[in-house]
């Protein structure tokens, strides 16, 4: 089978999983559109998270399918029975401890003077779901920072590194029992999406359908998984053996639901294929423009959350004047990761502006700290999205408009900058957008208005 | 430091072209072509050191002017701008008033615009020979006072002078109409063969050698009639 048809076969499998979940498990309305196709943002982003080893924060009101959507996606993409996923989930609450989340000492061995760690299912499995993460107190959120970021889990003197993992965390809107998610934790999430109410008609269907509670479950396989995870074999051996069980569950999925799920090798292939997809020049330049507006400060060199814009700044009107913080380097990583996965899923050769316009608001919404007056202005906008996602979408539309007004000029400026950096003596292309100023800074030129 | 712009290595650098820049550039090119053509004409005519108003010279200068502009594309704005350049610019090193008027007339006659308005009152210089051989279907409106030989050899066109005209108005005109809102100088209509001259002001004198055509003053026909009676209103 040639490369192209193999790719198409994988793509069809993923779409079949998406359709199955949408039609049977997570009923919701489509709310985003690209190239004539409509998708539900929560489901699509969960699928991309599972495929591209991402980290997703799912927000929303209680009971609207935040956790369930992630569970279904993980079960079908990774071939884990639902019972196993439930067992591995971490529930956010104030009494959580490192021992419950990551691992604990083997007490029997400890009595014998040996220090052996019993890792939690959460640590061992590649799919990780933290339910109601904002019920974890701020101090306890730090416990999972490294694991969330890199898949490194440490306890006592032992470490487990997940080569393949994805993370879903859910968060309810603020109530008496919730805490703030600490900034470094928020930044570690690639995307934030809302699981929305499906509307009364779909909600009626959800309530009216009888279920035996065994959807995507198989007790025998689940028990064999538990046995495997409790066994004292090495982590690498455990991963290898779990793949056999996953294959068996995959067969059950095919026989019972007609779904052909993905093997570990297929998931790896998707990631390899995804990584080959490049940004086209417009998407490349647009992302640079976006990052510029989120990090540029003419007066202080860059945005810093404790430094305020001064009155009468020349760059009032760009996004830098509406936000407080400086965007982190994780933004382009997240956007790149998800936009490539999305382009792969759509069968597109490159990441283009349309992919970015769909993906970026979700990678941006939780990372921007808007100035209070700007948030207040937009709070009462007529909108379908929660305020942070709505504001990110609107901001992106503004930047997109600015980009379209000067796309050629921006690309020229970047091309000229390349030549100048290579030693050619050529005049830089001037412009008002902060990106032109950042180019000058890269080239060591003095930046003064 | 790694070159962070390497993705744009192969992007052809297209200079941003503002429509205004392009228009200005085109205008400048047209103006330069007109100036070059004029200078060639002047160099041709300056060979004899002194430029005399002779039929053969005027015809030769006109034909040379026509030839030198035959491949140029320009409009009424360019003609007006060229006049302004002649009037004040340093780009044109020398002006000979006869050939300059003939050159402008050639430009007007070959111009694609049917109606041409020149605000001659804005110029310091007095232009002669304007409207020379103005062909049928063309209208030339001169706003302000003009020099000698205006409408000379007029060939069916319509010439309106919103001011005074000098001597030899409509000299040798063949056909067409000339209207002058104010006064005209001596030898008006000299060698006139056809067409009409209408003057609303004073006519200093009418040319003695005429072969046809009619001259009106205040709408009243004065030629062909008794010249003396017409001129002094008796």
Image: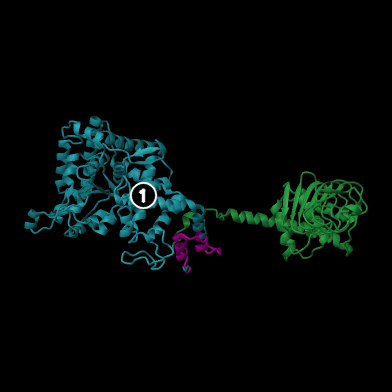
- Image spot of residue A184 (x, y percent): 26, 59
Which residue is under mark 1?
A393
Whether the magenta-drawn stretch holds residue A430 is answered as: yes
- Image spot of residue A270 (x, y percent): 35, 43
Read off the magenta span: A417-446
Query: Looking at the image, is A355 positioned above or below residue A187?
Result: above
In the figure, the shade used to draw chain A is cyan
**Left or right: where does residue A388 sit relative to residue A298?**
left
Decide which of A412, B152 is in the foreground and name it. B152
**Left or right: where does residue B209 sit relative to residue A351?**
right
- Residue B69 appears in the figure: no
Residue at the image position 68 percent from the left and 57 percent from the top: B28
Residue at the image position 29 percent from the left and 36 percent from the top: A17
- Image spot of residue B36 (x, y percent): 76, 58
Task: Choose top left, top right, bottom left or bottom right for residue B231.
Answer: bottom right
Tell which subunit mark 1 falls on: A
Q: How crowded is mark 1: few (under 14 residues within 10 Å), some or many (20 or more)?
A: many
- Residue A37 appears in the figure: yes
**Left or right: where does residue A382 sit relative to residue B193?**
left
Quadrant location, the N terminus of chain A: top left
- Image spot of residue A42 (x, y percent): 29, 43
Farthest residue in the left direction? A111
Q: The green chain is which one?
A: B
Residue at the image position 29 percent from the left and 56 percent from the top: A187
Farthest residue in the front direction? B234
The kind of secondary structure element at disc 1 is helix
Decide which of A138, B176 is in the foreground and name it. B176
């Amino acid at each position: 089978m040639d490369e192209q048809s193999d790719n198409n076969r994988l793509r069809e499998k993923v779409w079949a999983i998406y359709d199955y979940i949408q039609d049977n498990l997570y009923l919701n309305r489509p709310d985003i559109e690209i190239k004539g196709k409509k998708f539900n943002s929560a489901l699509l982003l969960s699928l991309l998270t599972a495929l591209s080893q991402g980290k997703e924060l799912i927000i929303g009101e209680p009971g609207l399918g935040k956790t369930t959507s992630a569970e279904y996606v993980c079960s079908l993409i990774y071939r884990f029975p639902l019972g196993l996923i439930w067992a591995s989930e971490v529930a956010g609450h104030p009494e959580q401890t490192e021992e419950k989340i990551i691992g604990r000492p083997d007490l029997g061995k400890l009595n014998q003077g040996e220090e052996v760690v019993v890792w939690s299912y959460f640590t061992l499995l590649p799919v990780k779901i933290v339910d109601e993460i904002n019920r974890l107190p701020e101090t306890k959120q730090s416990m999972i920072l490294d694991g969330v970021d890199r898949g490194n889990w440490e306890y006592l003197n032992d470490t487990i590194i997940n080569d393949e993992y994805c993370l879903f965390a859910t968060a309810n809107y603020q109530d008496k029992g919730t805490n703030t998610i600490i900034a470094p934790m928020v930044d570690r999430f690639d995307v934030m999406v809302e699981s929305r109410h499906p509307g009364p008609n779909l909600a009626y269907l959800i309530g009216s359908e009888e279920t035996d509670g065994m959807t995507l479950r198989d007790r025998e396989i689940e028990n064999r998984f538990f046995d495997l995870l409790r066994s004292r074999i090495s982590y690498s051996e455990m991963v290898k053996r779990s793949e056999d069980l996953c294959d068996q569950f995959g067969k059950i999925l095919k026989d019972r639901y007609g779904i052909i799920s993905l093997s570990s090798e297929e998931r790896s292939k998707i990631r390899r294929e995804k990584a080959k997809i490049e940004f086209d020049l417009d998407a490349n330049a647009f992302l640079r423009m976006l990052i510029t507006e989120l990090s540029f400060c003419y007066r202080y060199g860059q945005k810093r959350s404790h430094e305020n814009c001064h009155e009468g700044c020349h760059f009032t009107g760009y996004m830098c004047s509406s936000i407080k913080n400086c965007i982190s380097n994780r933004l382009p990583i997240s956007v790149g990761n998800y936009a490539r996965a999305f382009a792969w899923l759509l069968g597109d050769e490159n990441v283009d502006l349309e992919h970015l316009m769909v993906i970026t608001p979700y990678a941006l919404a939780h990372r921007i700290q808007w100035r209070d007056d700007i948030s207040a202005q937009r709070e009462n906008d007529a909108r379908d999205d929660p305020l942070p996602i709505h504001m990110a979408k609107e901001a992106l539309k503004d930047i997109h408009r600015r980009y379209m007004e000067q796309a050629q000029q921006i690309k020229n400026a970047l091309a000229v900058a390349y030549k100048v950096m290579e030693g050619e003596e050529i005049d830089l292309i001037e412009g008002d957008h902060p990106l032109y100023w950042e180019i000058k800074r890269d080239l060591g030129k003095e930046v003064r208005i | 430091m790694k070159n962070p712009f390497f993705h744009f290595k192969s992007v052809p650098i297209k200079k941003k072209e503002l429509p205004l820049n392009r228009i200005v550039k085109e205008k400048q090119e047209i103006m330069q072509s007109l100036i070059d053509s004029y200078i060639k004409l002047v160099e041709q005519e300056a060979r004899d050191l002194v430029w005399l108003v002779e039929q053969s010279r005027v015809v030769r200068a006109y034909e040379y002017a026509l030839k030198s502009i035959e491949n140029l594309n320009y409009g009424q704005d360019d003609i007006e701008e060229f006049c302004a350049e002649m009037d004040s610019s340093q780009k044109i090193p020398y002006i000979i008033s006869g050939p300059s008027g003939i050159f402008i007339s050639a430009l007007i006659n070959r111009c694609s615009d049917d109606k041409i308005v020149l605000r001659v009152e804005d110029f310091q210089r007095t232009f002669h020979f304007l409207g020379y051989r103005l062909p049928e279907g063309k209208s030339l409106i001169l706003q302000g006072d003009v020099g000698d030989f205006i409408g000379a050899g007029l060939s069916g066109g319509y010439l309106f002078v919103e001011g005074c005209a000098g001597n030899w108005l409509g000299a040798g005109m063949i056909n067409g109409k000339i209207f002058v809102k104010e006064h005209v100088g001596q030898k008006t209509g000299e060698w006139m063969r056809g067409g009409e001259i209408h003057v609303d002001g004073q006519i200093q004198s009418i040319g003695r050698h005429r072969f046809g055509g009619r001259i009106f003053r205040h709408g009243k026909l004065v030629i062909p009639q008794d010249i003396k009676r017409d001129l002094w209103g008796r």
